[in-house]
Image (spheres, rainbow, N blue to C red):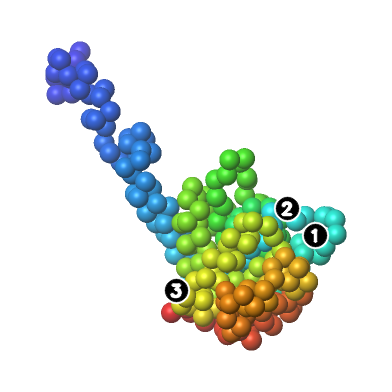
Amino acid sequence: MTDEATAVPPGLEAHLKSPSYRLAATDPDFLMGDSMRGVRFLMEYAKAEEALRAWGVRSTLVVFGSARVGADGEGRHAFWYEQARLFGKIASERGGALRGSPGQPRDNVIATGGGPGIMQAANQGAHEAGAPSVGFNVTLPHEQYPNAWSTPELTFRFHYFAMRKMHLAMRANALVVFPGGFGTLDELFELLTLRQTGKAPTIPIVLFDRAYWTSVINFDALIEHGMVKASDMDLFAYADDAEGVWRCLLEGGLKPGEEIV
């Protein structure tokens, strides 16, 4: 028996099947279209923001570095990995990430790009300390899975690099940059530019392994050619071990457990 209250009136089949009749919020073709790019950008902001607030993450310590560095890597790779792991542990134990349960305020929570290498090492150190940590992954042409050490509920995936960078920067109480390649350089110089131009708060930036960074970037040449001021070198410091990084952060003004403004 046909329910007259729910029966489709004759002649409306084409109308009901038309994409234009779909609810906008449940229409994937519409949501993924060019006109909704701004909305998708907003959604990427809001989704991560909601989860971070639910976990009480009000400030972070951001760790950048190469995805190609392994715990058993050649040359200095194993050392860099171990020091990133140790820093993640030290910072989580001393910075305020261990306080409370999900939803209560936590400060200086380790946040990385969520992938392998140095990112994995820092997340691993936080996990070993019993603290949560954040992984801000991004969709790449060759699929990159998140590392196993970031907290599952704080492991995100972004389509837009710009929104990922915004989330990495907006809660950062400090930036620690381990050796890396193009991506690491991109993230480092973005934060240095924000600091130089006063678009970001005065936060400490530490480059790990002075020998690596001074061999890769000739900062003195930038000064010599008038591209930056000598005083711009005060925007960052160098450290050569995990304890040294923590010491530089404290000397640079980091206050463990203090709420950011």
The spot of residue 139 in percent (x, y) is 55, 45
Quadrant assignment, res 249: bottom right
Instruction: Confirm whether residue 127 shows in the render.
Output: no
Up the image or down, 227 lies above or below 19; here it is below
Q: Quadrant of the N terminus?
A: top left
Alpha carbon of mark 2 to alpha carbon of mark 3: how far?
Answer: 31 Å
Frontmost residue, 119 versus 233: 233
Asked if the residue at tag 3 contacts the one at tag 2, i.e. Cβ–Cβ closer than 8 Å, the answer is: no
**Helix, strand or loop status at disc 3:** loop
- 2 and 1 marks in contact (CB < 8 Å): yes
Q: Which label number is shown at residue 68?
A: 2
Disc 3 residue type (three-letter): Lys
Amino acid type assigned to the residue bearing label 2 in the image: Arg
For label 3, the residue is: 199
Q: Residues within 10 Å of mark 2 (few under 14, many from 20)?
A: some
The x and y percentages for residue 81 are 76, 62
Q: Amino acid at mark 1?
A: His
Give the alpha-carbon distance from disc 3 to disc 1, as whole Å.
33 Å
Total marks placed:
3
Q: From the viewer's perspective, is residue 149 above or below residue 9? A: below
Q: Which residue is mark 1?
A: 77
The residue at 46%/56% (across/down) is 163
Mark 1 surroundings: few (<14), some (14-19) or many (≥20) residues within 10 A: some
Of residues 1 and 37, the one drawn nearer to the viewer in this rendering: 37
- Assign a secondary structure to mark 1: helix
Choose mark 2 or mark 3, whichever is in front.
3
Question: SS for tag 2?
Answer: loop
